[in-house]
Image: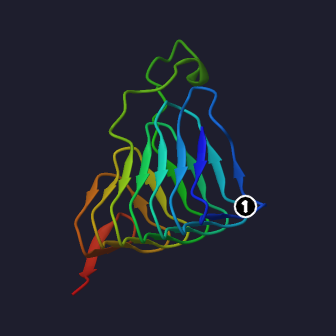
Amino acid sequence: MIELHPTAKVSHLADIEDSVRGTRIVVGAHSVIDSFVKVKPAGGSGDLVVGEHVVINAGCVLYTGNGIHIGNCVAIAANCTFAPVNHAYADRSRLIREQGFLPSKGGIVIEDDVWIGANCVLLDGAVLRRGCVVGAGSIVRGELLAYTVYAGQPLAAVGERR
C-alpha cells in the first residue's frame, strides 16, 4: 500500500513499486522523492516510512527488506542505496539464490535532522541517530552517534556538530 501525503512531491520519473505482501510505503508531508529514485519491496516484509520534510535525491535505491524508517528533516544525496536485507549463502550445496534470507538485524533507522552524502550504502541494522552526518561514499552498518560526523572506508568518526 502506497500512502503519499498530499503535500509530498514525487517525480513522475521516480519508480515506486507497490508491495504484493502488504508492505506499507509512506511518504510524509512536504517530502520530495526526486527523479530516478527506485523503491522496491524485496527481501522481507518491512515498511518504508519517510517522515516530513525529507529529500531523497536522484538515483537512490531503497529496498524495503526488513524495513526503513526515515525521520523528519533528513537530506539524502544522490545515488545512495538502502539495503535492509541479508542473503543467506553458507550452504555450499545450494545456489545462493535458493537459500533465501538471513534473520533481520533490525532494518534501517534514520532519526531526525540527518544528512547522508552521495553514493552511500546503508545496510541492515544501520541506526543513524539524530543530527549525524555521513560523508559521501560511506558504507554504514551498526549505530552512528547523534550529532557526529562520519566518513571514510572503513567508516570512522571525523568530527561533530556543535
Image position of 10 (left or right of 76): right
Color scheme of the displayed model: rainbow
Q: Nearer the viewer, residue 138 or 8?
A: 8
Secondary structure type for disc 1: loop
Judge whether 121 appears above or below 107 on screen. below
| Location of mark 1 (residue) | 36
Q: Residue at x 44, y 66 (%)?
A: 138
Placement of the C terminus among the 4 image quadrants: bottom left
- The three-letter amino acid code for the residue at tag 1 is Phe
Residue that lies at the very extreme toward the right in this rendered image: 13
Residue 50 located left or right of residue 19: left
How many marks the image carries: the answer is: 1
Question: Residue at 55% across / 62% down in the picture?
Answer: 80
Q: Nearer the viewer, residue 122 or 3?
A: 3
Tell me: residue 142, above or below residue 55: above
Measuring 72% from the left and 65% from the top, which residue is drawn there?
35
Residue at left offset 46%, top offset 17%: 91
* Residue 42: percent from left, percent from top: 58, 35
